[in-house]
Image (spheres, rainbow, N blue to C red):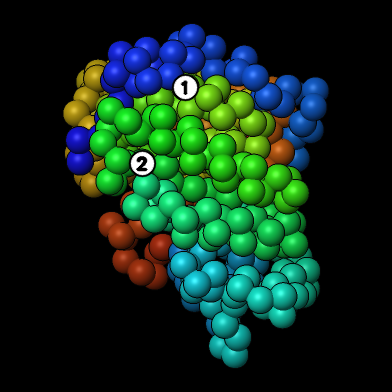
Amino acid sequence: MKNSISRRRFVVRSCGLLAGAAAASQLPGMASGAERRAAICVTCRDGHLKTAGEKDCWLAMAKLGAQGVEVSVADDLSLPALFHPTKKYTIATPEGIEQLVADMKAAKRPITALCMANRFDARPDFELQWTTKAAKAAKALGAKAIRIDVWPQKVPAARFLAFATDMMTKVIEATESTGVAFGIENHGGTTNDPEFLAALFQGVGSPRLGLTLDTGNFYWFGHPLSKVHELFQTFASRVVHTHCKSIRYPESEREKKRPRGWEYGKYNCPVDEGDIDFRRLIAALKKAGYANDLCIEDESLGKYPAYQQGEIVAREIRFLKGLL
């Protein structure tokens, strides 16, 4: 997919807003460390819950040690990965939200974020309605953030920054009453470009548009390891949610600019075995006043037998808790 963003094409010609990715922490509207108090919990993606082998998602969280969960939202606002032997969860109706809130409180396991797989330029009207409904539900659930995708499918790359700035402005305006933050994941060939991200954040200019920081994706994209940690620092005050994963590259490859996705399937690994320095990441997030989750998203689990996967997720959760 050829959708990487050049600085000249998007920043200079289309927007003229970027003063460099290093200035991202100073963009207008960002919350300072004094304005946000760190209260970080360790959670996991809802798709990992079945590795626990329990009969419902709440017992699974307890067994894994997850203090909460990120929940994937389908187009119809159902929550297919939250499993229960007698219930189907949804945020499409007040009754569905009420049931979910009751079960969440009973389990003492919050939903820290919703996860949406968006196609903003393919179906803008639907996306605006969908994200607005999701934001209202997130407010009712007490979820602080919604993970979103922002990448070009139909709009040409040369015009995508301008489109994304306009679309995100509409999303923020339509959901103003909810106070819920939207976290663009650094994902694929577009939002792993720090210059695109900085220009988009500055163009929209709202503290409610932030980053779902995927700790592995900047590294997957090909940024050298030292650059990855610099990006964590640069965007720390924009982070509203996380996906925690890692990669263990050979030492000779860590500081190289690698092709996008280079040998990812071979070298991706649990968070406690890889090159990402989570202690350093957590320090940057705490300094910025981050107050949401460290959410495990382990894409290496398929390398292991099913009977081992739950213990790996539990081990990763213990590892991150230990760093806090």
Give the residue drawn at x 78%, y 69%.
105
Along the line of sight, the residue nearer the viewer: 85 or 151: 151
The residue that disc 2 covers is 151
Crowding at dot 1, Cα within 10 Å, few <14 / some 14-19 / many 20+, comes out as many
User: What secondary structure is marked by label 1?
Assistant: helix
Q: Quadrant of residue 283?
A: top right
Crowding at dot 2, Cα within 10 Å, few <14 / some 14-19 / many 20+, comes out as many
Give the residue drawn at x 66%, y 31%.
207
Along the line of sight, the residue nearer the viewer: 15 or 89: 15
Q: Locate residue 150, reporting x and y percent.
A: 42, 42
Task: Name the residue furthest bottom.
Answer: 86
Q: Quadrant of residue 267?
A: top left
Q: Which amino acid does label 2 sit on?
A: Trp
Q: What residue type is labelled 1?
A: Ala
Relative vertical location of residue 14 with respect to residue 45 in this rendering, above or below: above
The residue that disc 1 covers is 199
Give the residue drawn at x 43%, y 52%.
124
Report the side of 291 relative to 170 (left or right).
right
Q: Locate residue 17, reporting x and y percent.
A: 48, 15
Distance between the alpha carbons at the discs numbered 1 and 2: 14 Å
Q: In which quarter of the image is residue 249?
A: top left
Q: Mark 1 vs mark 2: which is more N-terminal?
A: 2
Along the line of sight, the residue nearer the viewer: 279 or 4: 4
Q: Locate residue 285, reporting x and y percent.
A: 63, 29
Relative vertical location of residue 167 with respect to residue 197 in this rendering, above or below: below
Report the side of 171 relative to 200 (left or right).
right
Q: Locate residue 44, reporting x and y percent.
A: 54, 55
